[in-house]
Amino acid sequence: MTEFPQFPPGFLFGTATSAYQIEGGWHEDGKGLSIWDVFSHTPGKIKTGETGDVACDTYHDFQTDIDIMRELGLNAYRFSISWPRVLPLGMGEVNPKGLDYYSRLVDALLEAEITPFVTLFHWDMPQALMDAYGGFAGRETALIFADYAEVVVRHLGDRVKHWITLNEPWEHAWLGYFVGEHAPGRRRPWEYFRVAHHELLAHGMAVERIRALSPDAQVGITLGMHTIEPARPTAKDREAARLADQLTNTFFLDAIYRGRYPAELMRRIRFLRPPIQPGDMAIIAQPIDFLGVNYYSRGFVSHRWYIPLFRAWLDEGPRQPEPGAPPPQYTAMGWEVYPQGLYDWLMRLTQDYGRPVLYVTENGAAFDDVVSKDGRVHDPDRIAFLQAYMSQAARAIQDGADLRGYFIWTLMDNFEWAEGFSKRFGIVYVDHRTQQRIIKDSGYWVRELIRHQQASGR
Ligand code: FCB
């Protein structure tokens, strides 16, 4: 029997998903192509050779999953909108069937008393904008994104009151444009800061637009927060870790909350500096209503003289245990289980950025789940993971963080980007051949957690 962490009254318990990872219906009812459609269809890009063509097929059936959420007592759901489903070319003509799909989804959630949190961009850039402007490498795309936000908010803003502009701009820019492991699969380090800056500009422009159209809406952005530690206690590793923290974390946080990029990083990157035009930083830094925090793990950084500009190497995989300390535990992604890091981040945001309203918009773990002979999925590691991370979140609230909700990544096993379907993050198991759903033990644990919360009058 695990102990249940306690949260304040009105706390939201949700799960998170994203369009490309679950919807399928990749080429139906007028949807345009996204960079993920093109990327996953390119041989060699997805480790398992799979695509998101069908995924969890929620384009054809979202009700089954809403019924599961209801059964588990979840009262919030974070999902994303596929930009090319709404605007097949990214701009211009609207696809009414695409908009209608999301409208029905929102209605069904509200009917089930589940609060929708809608992400406008979770990495599935319309291919047409990739072809025309290089995706977010082009400044035009930021302006076009604001138009897209307007189309969606005009249609759903009467019912949706929580908007997330972008999901994890660092990961999208870094994995997609610098390293090339994600769509669009570019390996152009010199584009990286352009992309990151234009993502932030897109965010700011969309915030302005959403506010103008829906003054009572809550608008935020979701950032991946990374715990970065020096690999060894040397001055050089510390310096490398500081730069990596600026690159992955404070570049985005300082831009949004302080209207500037970290000075040390800007000096270091010289000719790669982002193309900031007059007024950009004010647009990026306008007030937001909440910050979405995605948190998973920590990484260690070491100084490497031969790496251009940063002279730093970030390692998130397994490492040697420290003498005397218990051996670290890793998930199926090879990420260390590090719950303390969530507490530290929630407190750092609270202290350094003026106690913003926070939501954990993603936290969870992949393990190698199997269906047992009894027909159930026993995932004690995930229960232990959630219990540990949620306890740290509850502790941060006690210590002053204004955390209002927690979204588990993810509702059901889905298309884990370059890993295909090989990594199972869900609290619901999905048989990807039959689309059958089986609630995992962790799903039932979440139900008990929520019941316990309600029973204690919260
Ligand atoms: C995050 C992504 C999400 C999912 C999890 C495991 O970086 O936002 O879509 O893939 O990682």
Image: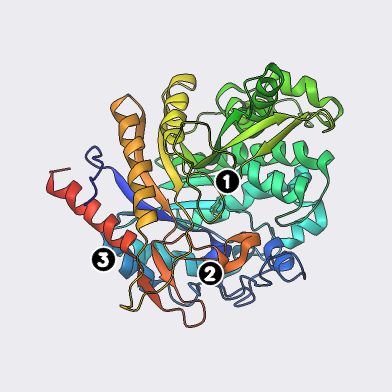
Tag 3, which secondary structure? helix
Answer yes or no: disc 1 within 8 Å of ligand 1. no
> Where's residue 51, x and y in %?
65, 71
| Distance from the alpha carbon under mark 2 to that under mark 3 | 21 Å
**Pick the front one: 386 or 189:** 386
Q: How many marks?
A: 3
**Which amino acid type is marked by label 1?**
Leu
Tell me which residue sits at (42%, 26%) in the image.
347
Dot label at residue 166: 1
* Image quarter of the C terminus: top left
**Pick the front one: 273 or 72:** 72
> Where's residue 118, x and y in %?
47, 53
> Where's residue 145, x and y in %?
65, 49
**Pick the front one: 107 or 411:** 411
* Residue 54 seen from this side: yes
**Along the horizontal axis of the image, is 405 left or right of 93?**
left
**Along the horizontal axis of the image, is 308 left or right of 76?**
right
From the viewer's perspective, is the residue at label 1 or at label 3 nearer? 3
> Where's residue 29, x and y in %?
59, 77
Residue at the outermost front position: 324
**Pick the front one: 70 or 231:** 231
Does 206 appear above or below 151?
above
Residue for badge 3: 71
Tell me which residue sits at (13%, 43%) in the image.
457
